[in-house]
Image (spheres, rainbow, N blue to C red):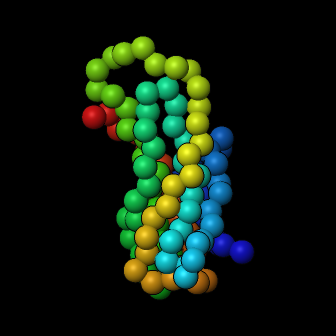
Amino acid sequence: MTKLDANGLTPDYPRTVWTQGDGKTVGVVAQEGGCGKASASVLEQNAATVKIELLETLPLTKQMCTMDIRFPPLTVQLSEPLGERTVVLTSRQEQK
């Protein structure tokens, strides 16, 4: 069972985390909608926690977009297996 701190997410954001293979690959479910594109990155890893940021990148220019919400599975790579560390999830949006 993966320990999870999802206090940095909005209440409706997915809270699914898993490990693959040797435990150095961590999977998460992100959220994106319309013209947005989700990505995940490791912000910090130490002996107690692994901080993962879920980012939705939105287009800078206004355009027609669908109104759907998607939940793509994403993975990040750790330098050491997750083990007993807590995964701390945060999310944000940016325009590019």
Q: Is residue 83 left or right of residue 40?
A: right
* Above/below status of 14 relative to 51: above
Point out residue 90 in the picture as x, y percentages from the top left corner: 49, 54
Q: Residue at x 51, y 37 (%)?
A: 32
* Above/below status of 64 relative to 42: above
Q: Quadrant of residue 83?
A: bottom right
**Number of marks in the rendered image:** 0
Q: Is residue 80 left or right of residue 15?
A: left
Q: Quadrant of the N terminus?
A: bottom right
Asked whether the viewer can see residue 7, the reply is no
Q: Quadrant of the C terminus?
A: top left
* Above/below status of 10 relative to 22: above
Return the residue nearer the eye: 21 or 45.
21
Point out residue 59 in the picture as x, y percentages from the top left corner: 33, 28
Q: Residue at x 32, y 33 (%)?
A: 95
Q: Is residue 95 left or right of residue 70?
A: left
Q: Residue furthest right?
A: 1
* Above/below status of 74 relative to 25: above
Return the residue nearer the eye: 36 or 87.
36
Q: Residue furthest top?
A: 64
Q: Residue furthest front?
A: 21
Asked whether the viewer can see residue 88, the reply is yes
Q: Quadrant of residue 77?
A: bottom left
Q: Is residue 14 left or right of residue 81?
A: right
